[in-house]
Amino acid sequence: MANRAATILHADLDAFYASVEQLLDPSLRGRPIAVGGGVVLAASYEAKAFGVQGGMSGRRARELCPDLTFVGGHFGEYQRLGDAAIGVLHDVTPLVERISIDEAFADVTGSVHLFGPAPAIAEAVRRRVRDELGLPISVGVATTKHLAKVASQVAKPDGLVVVEAGTEQRFLDPLPVRLLWGVGPVTEAKLADTGIRTVGELAAAQPELLRRLLGPAAGSKLGSLAVNADPRHVETGRRAASMGAQSALGRREATDELLHTTFGFLADRVATRMRAKGRAGRCITVRVRFAGMRSVTRSTTLPAPVSTTLTITEVAVDLARTALADHPREREVSLLAVSVSQLVTEPVLQLELPLGLPGDERRPGTPRAADRWAVDRSIDRVRDRFGRASVGFAAVALSDGHGVPDEFRELAERDGGHGPGQ
């Protein structure tokens, strides 16, 4: 059920990493810049105007924008300024749900008697972030989380959009469907093939058509979002429903070696975070983005929750091979991602007898898996004492790099994201 008033804020720092670099070096202001080198980690609005975007190879970015300036990342400043911006929201309400380093939801229902109407609070937040931190921030105000996020996208760059109660559908109907949460290029193309290009056309579509076109879950969800049916509340202490990481590769041939080294690296990051939080998961999903920006996903559910690096690596590689086999014309990839969901508190390891059941080789209690469990925890202890680079799996540690600095990944992962290149 929607709030009776528009008191949900979604605040999103604009082109955050690039904006921080322009703040630190005023000579970069107004110029097209990109954070990164071999791979674009983030781009300024001036660079985005030329088509430069995160995850793109540096070579392609320079072709699109010959005047592009690449800069290195100031990762400590990203964290400091991101924390400070979210801190401004905490100054007006305790109900803040941070969803990444540079964006958060806030429920100001209980704050209006102290600070005035929600639009005034949103404008005050924007003014403080600009005056105190020197950064642009866009804010959407609406009756639901979903609509507040859409409004903040419409507000970009450096703007404020308020969708008052009773005007939601009038606001949504003319917008392109790509602004809805969860609509990527593939879904947008599928909808366009049936003549659905705006949110209003999506809202008017038959539910059965959407379920048949997009699948039961995605079809029902999008149909609901198109009419602003979003019952979620701002959650201050939510636990992540999944953990994941991804690697933007520029444009690489999809060799078996690339799959093993990249998914080995990503699985190491994900599994380490899971173990640090005492979590394990059963559903493993991979995403493969081809050179033409088309993405496919494949997933599988294991017989028991796991958190071992090598098991997640093996499953991810198998899933990616399946995705590539289903698209034999695609020979190059630009991004690989893995996530683990259906998370539970990691159970105590119990050794199991090898009964020859399907999936036995991936059950955590088999002798092989138990050995992996022990190795992972030994690695965790060494890293806790001597740092992450002190020990690792040889195939990953000796590979030729992964395009994105570890500090950048850690920033994204720390706040529940999936790493750069999304």
Image (cartoon, helix red, strand yellow):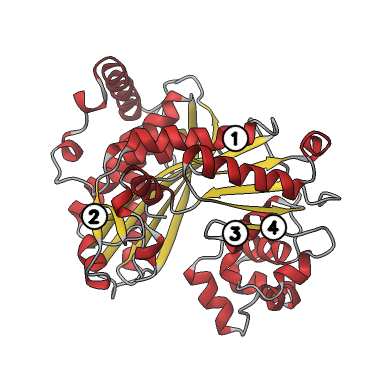
Q: Quadrant of residue 266?
A: top left
Q: Identify the residue position indicated by label 1 in the image.
A: 88
Residue 180 visible in the snapshot? yes
Q: Residue at 16% across / 34% down in the picture? A: 394
Q: Nearer the viewer, residue 293 or 395?
A: 293
Which callout, 4 or 3, points at the residue further toward the start of the chain? 4
Helix, strand or loop under label 3: loop
Calculate the distance from the C-alpha at mark 3 to the C-alpha at mark 2: 30 Å
Q: Are marks 1 and 4 in contact (CB under 8 Å)?
A: no
**Is 203 located above or below residue 136 in the figure?**
below
Disc 2 marks which amino acid?
Phe
Q: Identify the residue position indicated by label 3 in the image.
A: 181
Q: Identify the residue position indicated by label 2 in the image.
A: 70
Label 1: how many residues lie within 10 Å, few (<14), some (14-19) or many (20+)? some
Disc 3 marks which amino acid?
Trp
Disc 1 marks which amino acid?
Val
Helix, strand or loop under label 2: strand
**Foreground: disc 3 or disc 2:** 2
Label 3: how many residues lie within 10 Å, few (<14), some (14-19) or many (20+)? some
User: Residue 260: x and y, percent?
Assistant: 24, 48
- Mark sitting on residue 147: 4
**Foreground: disc 1 or disc 4:** 1
- Mark sitting on residue 393: none
Helix, strand or loop under label 1: helix
Q: Quadrant of residue 97?
A: top right
Q: Nearer the viewer, residue 170 or 187?
A: 170
For the C terminus, the quadrant is: bottom left
Calculate the distance from the C-alpha at mark 2 to the C-alpha at mark 1: 30 Å
Q: Nearer the viewer, residue 256 or 38?
A: 38
Q: Are marks 4 and 3 in contact (CB under 8 Å)?
A: no
**Foreground: disc 4 or disc 3:** 4
Q: Are marks 3 and 1 in contact (CB under 8 Å)?
A: no
